Amino acid sequence: MDNTLIFILLGLVGIVVGVVGTIVAYTIKGNSLQKKKDVILETARKETDKLKRDSILETKEELHKLKMEADKEIKEKKLELKETENRLTQRESNMDKRDLLFQKREEALDERESKITNKQTAILEEQAKIEEIKNEQIKILQDLSGISKEEAKVLVMEKVKESLELEIANYIKERENDAKLECDKKAREMLVLSMQRYAADVAEEQTVTVVSLPNDEMKGRIIGREGRNIRTIEAITGVDLIIDDTPEAVVLSSFDPLRREIARITLETLIKDGRIHPTRIEELYDKTCKDVNQKIIEYGQNALFQLGLTKMDSKLVEIIGKLHFRTSYGQNALTHSIEVAELAGTLAGELGENVNLAKRAGLLHDIGKAIDHETEGSHVEIGIDLAKKYHEPKEVINAIASHHGDTEPTSVISVIVAICDSLSASRPGARNDSLENYLKRLEQLEKVTVDIPGIEKTFAVQAGRELRVIVKPDEVDDLTSYKIAREVKEKIENEIQYPGTIKVTVIREVRAQEEAK
């Protein structure tokens, strides 16, 4: 038991000693930490003071630099202001000098104006004196001549008028001659160029077609028993068959080329087939009509392709193809239209106009002839209706309306088409004209001068291309002859329809004749 108490006491003593030791250790450690803390704080305070001093120094240096820069800028500004002040002072001095100059000029102008006013007053006084003297002289002249001022004025004006009429007539004559020479030269150049670029063959269309036969026995087969075959052919085609003594040939006669072409193809097909009877004739005729209609469309399309035209209604293309089977004075209408289109395109190009529009108008100018046998009215009226129906341009419509002079042309294209139409129709061999129409035109041309005074005789020469007018020399002077030529030209243009151009020549001749005995 005693050992136990001893151990307990020793344990308690150990614990007390441990606690005391621990407290002493912590106290010593706390004192050491306090010292370290004081050292760290002192060090931090010293560094803070040092940084504070450094920043103050840097701030002072920066302020010094800014002050130096500000002083420098102020000096520069002062220099600039001083220079500006000097310039303003100089400018003000110059302006003062100018003011002095302007004042001197103003004084000089005032002085000059005063002198001018005085001179004007003197001139007005002189004019009044001159007018007074003039009136006195006029009065003296009137008393001496016995006529008034107004009468004298009328006489002078009449003299001046007579003199001016002669001068004006001479001037007009000279200018007309110059203009005619220049216009004729330009027109010849353009027409020759157009005709050189387009040279079409001259081929007259006839009213008959000859169909070759393999032998003369075929004539009997064509006639048929009691003539039934030939009657059938003539009835359904509308063409007359002429079978005469001409060997191995049959003649088809008709004024309608389309009917004649259909009859020719039908007859040639019958001859090749060998079966010639009324039923077969009707079958082949129907088939040929369809083939010819297709060929008509091809003719129209080929015409457009040849001229380089596009965007045209298919119905109108078909009508153009029908022109191939129409003639005018023996001239193929489609060939004529293509020729006019080519010439019109060339002339339009030379004049700077729309070439395609000119070709279109030239191709369609006679479109009415394709169906004028089917519709009432002239080919011009029919052509206008067709062009409006298929929405052709207004220039094309006007070209159709004016190409025979029925309507005034409203564009250069219309005038070009009219010229090319006359050119195509009037070239040698293009058309057949009967002797009766030819003589009638010459007679009408010679009678156009009947009501013009001063004309003695009139002769149409060179197949109607020139009209020679002989005037009475005692009634017509040289200047009046030019007036008569112009008047005759206007009457021909207004009263006569003619192909090409007609030259008017007025001849005034004075013959002095004596007889020696």
Image (tube, rainbow, N blue to C red):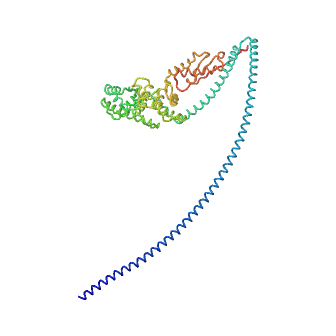
Q: In this view, does 511 lie above or below 426?
A: above
Q: Picture quarter containing residue 28?
A: bottom left
Give the image location of residue 473, x and y in percent.
66, 17
Q: Which of 280 and 116 is in front in this view?
A: 116
Q: Nearer the viewer, residue 321 or 256?
A: 321
Q: Picture quarter containing residue 295?
A: top left
Q: Residue 478 vs residue 502: left or right?
A: right
Q: Is residue 223 visible?
A: no
Numbered marks: total: 0
Give the image location of residue 516, x and y in percent.
73, 14
Instruction: Please give the name of the residue rendered at 52% of the width and 68% of the height, measured from the top-left corner.
Output: 51
Q: Can residue 225 be seen in this view?
A: yes
Instruction: Please give the name of the residue rendered at 62% of the width and 20% of the height, measured from the top-left corner.
Output: 483
Give the image location of residue 313, x and y in percent.
40, 34
Q: Residue 74 vs residue 279: left or right?
A: right
Q: Which of 123 and 369 is in front in this view?
A: 123
Give the image location of residue 162, x and y in percent.
67, 18
